[in-house]
Amino acid sequence: MPASGSRAAAIAARLSAVGLPARVEEYDRYTSVEAEIPKMPSADLWQEALEVVAEADRFGLRATSQNDRTLWAVVHKAVPTTGDVGGPSHQR
């Protein structure tokens, strides 16, 4: 598993441990973690959840008009440092 996947899995496990079951999704450039926030979270839950997602490269909160809230975190994948990173038309 790439380092980004391991970091994201660790974030997801820690969120689940504080009572927020998390989903992990792999994308080309990053790995995302999402967890639904309960309607009335305690201050302690918020504190713990924010400490966990602070380990990510980016994080935020998505809220809908139905008062649903999803805490999200993104861990960027490393950019290759060798090989054909520029593609066939890349000039060196």
Image: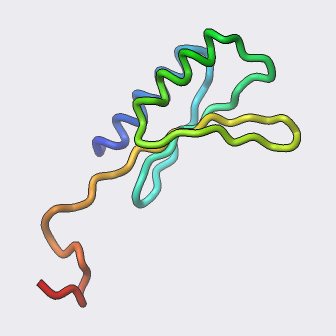
Which residue is found at the position 34% from the left and 43% from the top? Answer: 4
Against 84, residue 27 (above or below) is above
Residue 73: % across, % down: 51, 39
User: Nearest the camera: 89 or 42?
Assistant: 42
Against 62, residue 79 (above or below) is below
Quadrant, the C terminus: bottom left
Which residue is found at the position 52% from the left and 15% from the top? Answer: 17
Which residue is found at the position 45% from the left and 30% from the top? Answer: 54
Residue 9: % across, % down: 42, 33
Does residue 67 appear left or right of residue 6 in this picture? Answer: right
Residue 77: % across, % down: 34, 51
Image quadrant assignment for residue 63? top right
Against 3, residue 91 (above or below) is below
Does residue 77 appear left or right of residue 51 in this picture? Answer: left
- Give the color scheme: rainbow, by chain, secondary structure or one colour: rainbow
Does residue 68 appear left or right of residue 62 in this picture? Answer: right
